[in-house]
Image: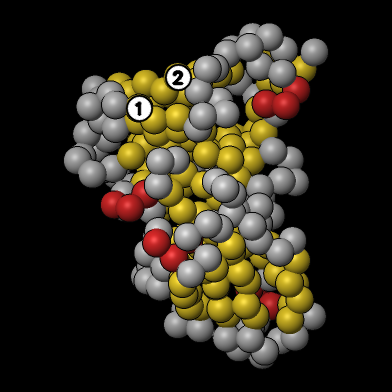
């Protein structure tokens, strides 16, 4: 069974870049048919999809974040990464990585990591 | 509209049936998933493709989707079902509903 684990700094200064990694184990990130996603949850709020990457490198982002987001994949290391530039306090959230299969069904999630943006 | 609307909260007595709705424009034309999330934990998929249950999800949890509304139904609700529930769909982008807090009391 595939497992995902987020890692990265728990605190980022405002105006800087948030960078997170998601390590995948129990399965290959190069498997066809899976979309490797980032989803966030503001404290006490709902879920917000950030974007996904396919193992080929093809990406798709939430229009509301598209100008600030990039997602990359490293098939040799079996992980994918998120970068969010020019962060503000509004980017403080728990960030989840997740795998989606056919019909964008998110059937595997990491535990999530809290990132706090400080001034 | 590109929004999914859920009631903020639903309350149910133990053993009764809980229904959580998710409304969106022509939602019945799209596939809907439902997630259960308990405090401090990641979401857990409980329904996908409108009506299907992943392995390990009890039969008392079911889903439907027609017209502009998808519904998650929990029959014989137990205290263990108390959680936040989110609907999700996608067409040109992935969308989540705002979430519904299910209280069992």
Q: Is residue A117 left or right of residue B95?
A: right
In this view of the protein, can residue B37 be seen by the observer? no
Residue at (72% x, 12% y) in the render: A14
Image vertical order of residue B14 relative to residue B101, above or below? below
Q: Position of residue A112 (x, y in %)?
A: 56, 40
Disc 1 chain ID: A
Question: Tell me, what colour scheme is on the image?
Answer: secondary structure
Residue at (38% x, 53% y) in the render: A105
In this view of the protein, can residue A16 be seen by the observer? yes
Image vertical order of residue A61 relative to residue A42, above or below? above
Secondary structure category for the residue under label 2: strand
Asked whether the residues under marks 1 and 2 belong to the same chain, the reply is: yes
Residue at (45% x, 19% y) in the render: A70
- Marks 1 & 2, CB-CB < 8 Å contact: yes
Give the Cα separation between the discs numbered 1 and 2: 8 Å
What residue is shown with label 2?
A70
Q: Position of residue A99 (x, y in %)?
A: 38, 44
Secondary structure category for the residue under label 1: strand
Q: Residues within 10 Å of mark 1 (few under 14, many from 20)?
A: some
Image vertical order of residue B48 relative to residue B98, above or below? below
What residue is shown with label 1?
A59
Residue at (66% x, 47% y) in the render: A46
B15 or A110, nearer to the observer: B15
* Pointer 1 or 2: first along the chain: 1
């Amino acid at each position: 069974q595939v497992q995902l684990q987020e890692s990265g700094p728990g605190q980022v200064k405002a105006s800087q870049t948030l960078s997170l990694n998601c390590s995948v184990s129990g399965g290959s990130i190069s498997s066809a048919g899976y979309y490797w996603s980032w989803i966030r949850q503001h404290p006490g709020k709902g879920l917000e999809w950030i974007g996904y990457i396919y193992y080929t490198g093809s990406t798709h982002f939430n229009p509301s974040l598209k100008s600030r987001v990039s997602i990359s994949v490293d098939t040799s290391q079996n992980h994918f990464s998120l970068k969010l530039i020019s962060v503000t306090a509004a980017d403080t959230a728990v960030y989840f990585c997740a795998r989606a299969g056919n019909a964008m069904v998110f059937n595997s999630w990491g535990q999530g990591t809290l990132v706090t943006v400080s001034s | 509209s590109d929004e999914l609307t859920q009631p903020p909260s639903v309350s149910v007595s133990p053993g009764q049936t809980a229904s959580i709705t998710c409304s969106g424009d022509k939602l019945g034309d799209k596939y809907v998933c439902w997630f259960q999330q308990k405090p401090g934990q990641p979401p857990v998929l409980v329904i996908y493709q409108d009506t299907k249950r992943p392995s390990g999800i009890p039969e008392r949890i079911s889903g439907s989707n027609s017209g502009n509304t998808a519904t998650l139904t929990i029959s014989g609700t137990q205290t263990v079902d108390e959680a936040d529930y989110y609907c999700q769909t996608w067409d040109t982008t992935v969308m989540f509903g705002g979430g519904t807090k299910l209280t069992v009391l």
